[in-house]
Image (tube, rainbow, N blue to C red):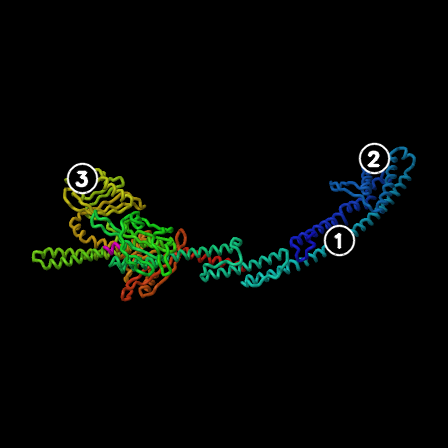
Amino acid sequence: MRLFKRPLKDWKIRNLAYLVGLGTIILAIATFIVLTQLGFTKKTILRNQYLTNLNLIVQPLAPDNLADDNNKFDQHIKKIDKLIYVFHRGGELTYNDKAVKIKAVEDKDYLAAMSNLRTAWDNYKTSLYNWQTDDFKSSGNNKALSDLYAGFEKEISKVQEEVVNLTIKEERKKNIATVIIMLYVSFLIVMIILIMRYLILGPIYKVSLASRELAKGNLADKIDYNTRNEVGYIAKNTNALADILKNATNFTKKIGEGKLDAKFEGIDENDNALANSLLQMRDQMQESAKADQERNWVTEGLAKFADILRTNNDNIQDLSFLIISNLVKYIGANQGALFVLTDANNKDEETKIVLEAAYAYERRKRIKQELSIGEGLVGQVVQEGDKIYLTEVPENYVEIKSGLGETLPRAVLIVPLKINEEIRGVVEIASIDKIPAYKIEFVEKLGENIASTIANTKTNERTRKLLQESQEMTEQMRSQEEEMRQNMEEMEATQEEMARAQAEMEQKETSLNALINNTSDSIILIDTDYTILVMNQVIKDRYKGTQYEIMKEGHNALDMLGDVRDEWKAYYDRAFAGERLSFTIKSSVKGENSYRHYDINPIKDSHGNTTGASIFSRDITHEKKLEQEREEITQKMERRGFVMDAMINNTEDTFFAIDANYEILVVNDVLKQRFAQSNIDLRPGVNILDILPKDQLNKWKERYDKALAGEKLRIEEIRELPSGNLTIETRCEPISNDQGEVIGISTVSRDITDLKRAEEQVTKLQQELDRLKK
């Protein structure tokens, strides 16, 4: 009953629906009763049919129709007897082979008429049974029988009149009930209209107007409808949705303005899927922006230090100070030191670790310190070949001093400077703040470049010293007698050869020529079982008259090697593992004391599986002498090449540079491997226009021409792959000489798919917000 205590506007719509449903059920029951129990029912039709035609039914039993041979006499009596009884007292009748139950009528006039009819029938029926006896027939009682029949017909007429009256009464009751039902239906319809108008349609119209404003983006308007029914709840939830959309709009607007630290106001992210998705989007964009910032920081740092290493490699001390001072500043540390390993001149001399430069708080610290390998943390790093990163610094460690006082560093990083697993020095950095992982990784990557540059700088110093000594020696030889002129000419020839070698190495530095794998001197091919597959005639002639003379195709290459069997087996195994070997050794096959150069390379099938190895050798005894003289210069130029390789290959981006004639000057391994997948050999000296696809040629030539004209280009393109589409960012920038003239182009490409996906997710979420607003 609490429902009826509420105001009508607070009634639940479902409760109103229940009441309307109940009223409809009552209407249906009343209609059923009227249709089945009032008016011309089946029982009424049977009553009218039998009783109005009763005079015809009893006609076979009239005195004039009686006969002695009437075989159906008893059946007629029983039928009439049953009809009178059923319509007087009630009972069952068979109609169309179905039993119909007839109830007794409670109308007094009708019952009185039926009672008189029954009495008249009983009297006539008794006379009929008596009539069948011979005594009754002979006594002349036919007139009495006719009188009884006449009285019976009179009562039938009375009953028929009462049946008509009874039918009229029932029809009147049905009409009254129908009127009542119509009034009830009218009342029910009026109630439904009022409920729909004032409790449902009116409030829903208000909600629809407010929702339309909400769809237009008008988030300030609220629905003014405060009830405790379903429509009220819809209005309340719509207002809440408007608040959520308003907060979401403000949030996405801040994100679009680059404020990635924006907060979602007004709701807990765990209570709303939209808020949770937007916050996840913000977090992903923060992570992407942070990762991109770290990558840019590393790339810029490598480029910065590559310029420092390239332009300051004449003096080891000046170079060391430039490296450590810029490194301390760039990573935001406080103190730093750079140690360099000395070169032992002989086996008995111990390698030392010398402090070449130290830096702290914008001031150069001139401290000379020498350590042994394994001594202290620096010596331990050299001995183990791995970095040390301390976050719990001992109390007796170095102190960081400033104008306000001094304190212990919170983090110390010591990184070995090594190239090709050979340690050239150590960088030690102390910081008040902890050093992030990406900065540590940056220092490790930079360490390879620093190590290569230190090695080249040392080589330059030794080369200058050698050249100076050579010049002094030349001056002395010029002052000697004529007999030394021949030696002078040979010395000049040696210098020319050294200059030629230096020019060749410089060309190698810019073009990165492929390693030469074939030779015309001595060739042996073996399979992975060490069985000789091919021997050229040169090697066969060389082995004649020696213990190796019996070696030929089909023999095992290790059988005749004797004491050096294990050594050569190791060489072959390394080649089978994919390693390319190139070395020079002394050779004495026929007792001679000569030098031979060997190139051992793996042989691979079309699937990349190693099937054997090729061994190329040649006599370089004469060349060895010249090589020993220019070895230091060669090492210098090779290490310069390593520096360039490290700069362009320690990245996942693609890089290449061309000159003004579109010829490739340098290309990194990532781009080489991508072109190799299309069977294109991308190397220095190749014209880039000759290898570009025809459908890409004009587009890229136009871009190169713009860059050669001094324009900096940034291009974004979609690359379709079987595994999914990639978004590639390409930058083409001109390369200028000291006079500002454009002499070439550098092209760098990188994958920005993750960043684009994050932007697409922002767009999708914004579209979802727009859809919700509608």
Mark 2 or mark 1: whose residue is earlier in sequence: 2
Neighbor class of circle 3 (other Cα within 10 Å; few <14, some 14-19, many 20+) is some
Q: CA distance from mark 3 to mark 2?
A: 151 Å
Please state the extent of the stretch shown in magenta in the rendering. 451-458
Please state if 177 lies on the left or on the right of 526 as rendered. right
Q: Quadrant of the C terminus?
A: bottom right
Circle 1 packing at 10 Å, graded few (<14), some (14-19), many (20+), is some
Tag 1: amino acid: Thr
Q: Earlier in the sequence, mark 1 or mark 3?
A: 1
- Which residue is denoted by mark 2 in the rendering? 69
Above or below for 247 versus 137: below
Mark in front: 1 vs 3: 3
Q: Nearer the viewer, mark 2 or mark 1?
A: 1
- Between 125 and 489, the one lying in front of the other is 489
Q: Which residue is mark 3?
A: 548
- The picture places residue 109, in percent across and down from the top left corner, at 85, 47
Q: Main secondary structure of the magenta part?
A: helix
Q: Which residue in the structure is indicated by mark 1?
A: 178
Q: Amino acid at mark 3?
A: Tyr
Asked which quadrant contains residue 689, the reply is bottom left
